[in-house]
Each structure stands twice: as C-alpha cells, then as structure tokens.
Image (tube, helix red, strand yellow):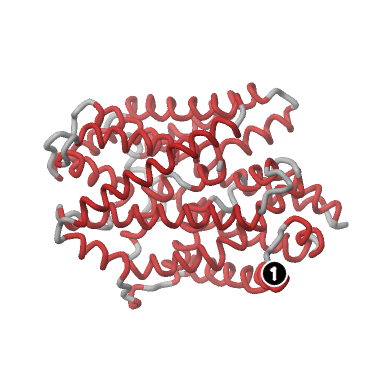
Amino acid sequence: MAAVGFAIGLGNIWRFPYITGENGGAAFVLVYLGCVLLIGLPILIAEIALGRRGQGDPPTSFSALARSAGVSERWAWVGHLNLMTAFLIMATYATVAGWVLAYLWSASSNQFTGIDPAGASDYFARLLEEPSRMFLWMALGLFTTGMIIAGGVQQGIERAVRFLMPLLFLLMLLLVGFNATHPSFGAGFEYLFRPDFGRLTPAVFLAAVGQAFFSIGVAMAGMMIFGSYLPKGQSIVRCGLLIILADTLIALLAGLMIFPLVFRYGLDPAGGVGLIFKVLPVAFGQLPYGSLVGGLFFLLLSVAAITSMVGFVEPLVATFARVKAISRIRSAFYVTLSLVAVSLVSILSYSTWSELRLWGLDLNGITDFVSNQVMLPVGGLMIAVFAGWVVSKQVLADEIQFSAPWQFSLWHGLIKGLLPLAILVILISGLAG
C-alpha cells in the first residue's frame, strides 16, 4: 500500500495530462499504455524483487546481489543512479506539491467561487510571480514528508492510502460525471482515445517511456526500498499488478477529468505544467458546494503528493543514514534541508531566473528532460540488464512466484532480451530526434 501511495500522485493527476497534451493526445496515450504493460510492469517486478532479495538501500542491494553472483560490486552505481534520479525529480516535484498546498488553501477559502478561465490563468501566473509564497508552501510539503519518514514509513502511509486513495478516486469519478453532462466530454474523450498515428515520432515514444517510469515509480529507488520492506510471504507479482492497475486507472481518470474541461473552456491542451491549475479552479467555481469539493479534492491531492514524496525521499534518507552512520531522524533532517535548497532553484526558474535558457529550455525544463527522459530510461535499462544477466534465474524464481512456470519464463525472457533492446532503441532514437 505504501508503494501504491508512491505510484499514485502528481505523476498521474498533474503530469500525465500535460505530457499527453504536449505529445498529441491519444497516440501518446496508446504508446504510454503499451510502455506501462510491456516495459514498466516487468521492470517493476524486477526492481521490487531485487529490493527484497538485497534487503538494503539501493546501492547496498545492488552491491550485495552482485557479490553473491560473483561479479564486481561496482554494480552499486546503478543504485546511485536511481538515487540521483529521485533527487533531481524531487527538485521540481516539491515545487508542484507546494502549488497543490497553496491551491488547497485557496479552494478552501472560497477564492475560486465564480472564477472564469482568464481569472484562473491569472491566478496561476500571480503564484509564479511570488517566489517567497511558493517557497513557504514547498518547504511545508517537504518538512511534512521529512517528519513522516523520520517517524517510520509503513504504518502511517498504509493507513492514509487505504482510506484516502479510494476517496480521491471517488471524487475524480464525480468530476468525470460532471464533465459527462456537457457536450465537451465527447471532444475530451476523443482526444484521449482516438489516436492520430501520424503524430507518432521517436520523441513521443521516449516521452511515453519516461512518463510510464515516472508514473509507476520505476528506476527512482523508491520501489526497491519498499521491496526491501516487503514481507517474504507477499506476492511480488500481485503487488506489481495492483500498483499498475491503480496507477493506470487514476491516470486515465485524470485525463477524462481534465481534457473535457480544457475543450469546454477553450483552453490549449498543450498548456504545460500549469494545465490542471488553470482548469480545475474554474470547474470548482461552477460546481454546487464548489469550495467544499475543491478543498476536499486538493486535500486528497496533497496527500497523494506527500505519499509520493515519501517514496522519493525514503531511499535517500536510508542511504544517507547508512553512509554517514547517523540516525534516521538526523538523516531525514539533512536530506530535507538539501531538497529545500535545490527546490529553490526550481522556484526561481519560474520567476527571477525565467530568462536563463539552454537549448531552448529553462532550468526546470533541463532538469525534467535529463531526469525523466534520460536517467529514468537508463536506470530502467540497467535494472533489466542486472536482473536478466547478473542475478541467477533461480534467485529470481525464489522471489517471484507466478501462477504458472511459463509466465516466469516469459517474464525472464523479456527482462533478459527484448526489454533492454527496446529501451535502448527508444532512448537513442528519441534523443537523436
């Protein structure tokens, strides 16, 4: 359940709609779903299995498994790569989590009542122009995350996820139902599910792989550390399927929640990182009891953001505590402080440093591209190679119990052969394009 909380978060509800909009809609969605099922799920199972077998933070697990396989312990660098990926993603993710907390306050205090699309866009623009305000909300989110981790992950996160995630799902269904009463629902549905294959490019495939890994939580150390906490009697396959099912369902619901509103209010589907913040306040402003519904929605989204940040930060804290031989509480404090510092760069990139650009991208754009479309695919590729070629087949069979032997053979064949090749081709062609 902690892993489900890690997977379900801003990657589904904030990032999936705007990445879909920037990559042409349904054609991207189709490739994304293929990447989730054919690439993401097998590597997710492998990562959880490696974590449970290694019984440590990612570098420790890779090192121990490599040593037991009779190869160099330098494979620990894959664990360090996953940790660095998580750290870079958190540099921008924490800023967006701060936006969610700011909108929770605004929605609960009736600031969106009667707001129109222009007013919602202006409201978001004003938020970006106030770095001190963004900093306070970002810091609040990160220190809340740090306190949860310092106190222990499993009990608090599991209880929150069991109660609040179904409630978030029901509230999203309510908003989809609200959309279904308007003619724009057809346009949003078609945008999501009627693909124009002429829009497929290598860059779209690379973006889909990156979004699949980001959304599921693959190759960013969180699933491996949660795997190390997973009891021996729990089925890794069942856990992986549950994570994939919940994650994909929430992402598609987010699309049905956002895109009909985009067409209803005449907005641009490729509206960028602020898409949901420009759309949802207008919907809440028109709903009966909109302040209550909006406040509840952003409260639940805040919880989803925090549980995801716990998944990002937990392996960083566990590794730092081991390396520096310090307590978990001190490690959580130092890691949180460092994330607050680097997240300040992200905040300033939206305001004071917005003119700083490299290859046409601002600092946030560069960080997002490097972490999500380079480091995540490379990390997933190396997890597949390590599981398929370094760890013995028998070790994996001891950890991963499929319902039939042929299913394990199929999974192992994918991990060992097809998936590394597919990721490599998508990565090279996408970067070249």
Residue in the image at 63% along x and 68% along y: 420
Q: Position of residue 425 (x, y in %)?
A: 56, 72
Residue 348, compared with residue 337, is above or below; it is below
Q: Which quadrant of the figure has residue 268?
A: bottom left
- Total numbered circles: 1
Left or right of 244? Residue 121 is: left
Q: Which residue is mark 1?
A: 404
Determine the image quadrant of residue 287. Answer: top left
Residue at the image point whose x is 55% and y is 36% from the top: 158
Q: Does 295 sit left or right of 326 as displayed?
A: left
Judging depth in this view, the residue of 170 and 44 nearest the camera is 170
At label 1, which amino acid type do we have?
Answer: Ala
Counting other residues with Cα less than 10 Å from the Cα at mark 1, is it few (<14), some (14-19), or many (20 or more)?
few
Question: Which residue appears at 61% of the width and 63% of the height?
Answer: 42
In front of the other: 376 or 49: 49
Which quarter of the rendering shows the C terminus? bottom left
Above or below, comparing residue 334 to residue 205 in the picture? above
Looking at this view, is 421 or 294 the one in front? 294
Up the image or down, 31 lies above or below 83; here it is below
Residue 277, horizontal then vertical, whole percent? 27, 42
User: Horizontal and vertical percent for residue 291?
Assistant: 21, 32
- Can you say which quadrant of the picture contains the N terminus? top right
Residue 16 image offset from top left, x and y in percent: 38, 54
Residue lying at 43% horizontally and 37% vertically, measured from the top left: 164
Q: Secondary structure at mark 1?
A: loop
